[in-house]
Image (cartoon, rainbow, N blue to C red):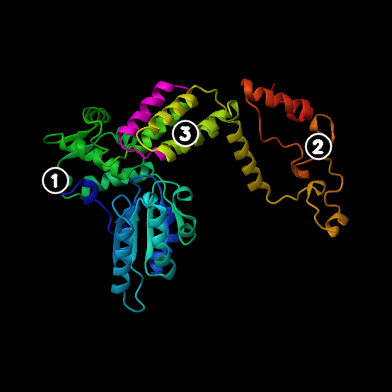
Amino acid sequence: MSQPLAERLRPRTLDEYIGQRHLVGEGAVLRKMIDTGHISSFILWGPPGVGKTTLAQIIANKLNTPFYTLSAVTSGVKDVRDVIERAQKGRFFNEASPILFIDEIHRFSKSQQDSLLGAVEKGVVTLIGATTENPSFEVIRPLLSRCQLYVLKSLEKDDLLSLLNRALTQDVILKERHIELKESSALLRYSGGDARKLLNILELVVEAENGDVVITDELVISRLQQNPLAYDKDGEMHYDIISAFIKSIRGSDPDAALYWMARMIEGGEDPQFIARRMVISASEDIGLANPNALLLANAAFDTVMKIGWPEARIALAEAAVYLATSPKSNSAYLGIDAALATVRETGNLPVPLHIRNAPTKLMKDLGYSDGYKYPHDYAGHFIPQQYLPDELIAKRFWKGQHNPSEEKLYQRMVNYWGDRFMDKEE
């Protein structure tokens, strides 16, 4: 039985590698490390099918160094220690450190990650981790601090078209078939920037045809409808389904939210992943329109951690329905992004003197805290005074949206600040 197309086309060198030019293009950071032969430990973070495993293998081949692989799904602490011991025994003096590649490192427990620390710190192994999850949440801080973090992006249209051309002209099996790529929109759309998914779909379509093959959008859609999961054997719909789940909550459709949650549950999704995404949604999409949403989402997360599966599905469902049926606001989300953009644009503007801290006599003599009015000393616990830097004195970041909960907050600000908080467009 022949290898799958995605495996047959796996690049062996950087020249064959498609995409991620910001990391491996001429003069890019990883390219320089590889060319000099000096590799430090790093973690590759990106969606499925963008070349994380392939890049690690190319590096090992280029450096001609021992390459050990562990899967966080099937490996335990003992497996980690066994690999480290083999790496120590098999390494010669002044030889480059063996590379230890850990796929799905976000699934490693804290104890498994702890068992890596000493070997990474002493250079016994050079760690290359691959993850589809934000390492800030999933990788322990001591290990993360010993690794560089490189973000891989979904492949762009030109990258995917280049990959299709390579498959049709260079693959030992496909090049023997007469295949015409008449249309590519459906192939690209269903692949979602995932090279492996793209090649799986292409292989599915070609294998279903006898003789000459003319690939059209209609043919691709037809084949995928007949085999809805055939192009997703390794759970690559993970990102599509979580996107559908979050968008259903955002769109206030509790039935759709429950359906997509059920799809994730039946697919074996980590319940903590579902809970974490709902906490994010409660902050981003419901926000101040219903502040209780964040409390309930956090409670669901806590319940998952305390009671586990399968009972935790009930708490997750309760939270999903509550979030979907809640009023929506993204004013806090927009506000912090607007503030961050201003900080990046204006830099470190000075804090007004009257709201600076003055713990020493010198600071008091310099005017620190001079003129500050303590709001609790005034009627209504409010007194107008300047809190923003001089350059941003009239700047607005938070703009209340029109829902019952936020309208109260907005009107309070108008009562306090007058024209500054009046929406000019109204």
**Residue at mark 3 to residue at mark 2: CA–CA distance:** 37 Å
Pointer 2: what residue?
Answer: 375
Residue mark closest to the camera, 2 vs 1: 2
* Along the viewing direction, whichever of 343 and 208 lies nearer the viewer: 343
Q: Residue 166, labelled with which disc?
A: none
Seen at 43% across and 39% down, the residue is 306
Which residues fall within the magenta stretch? 251-272
Outermost residue to the bottom: 93
Seen at 30% across and 40% down, the residue is 235
Left or right of 385 in this view: 94: left
Q: Earlier in the sequence, mark 3 or mark 1?
A: 1
Q: Which quadrant of the structure image shows residue 376?
A: top right
Up the image or down, 243 lies above or below 19; here it is above
Pointer 3: what residue?
Answer: 300
Describe the element under mark 1 as helix, strand or loop. Answer: helix
Q: Which quadrant of the structure image shows residue 365?
A: bottom right
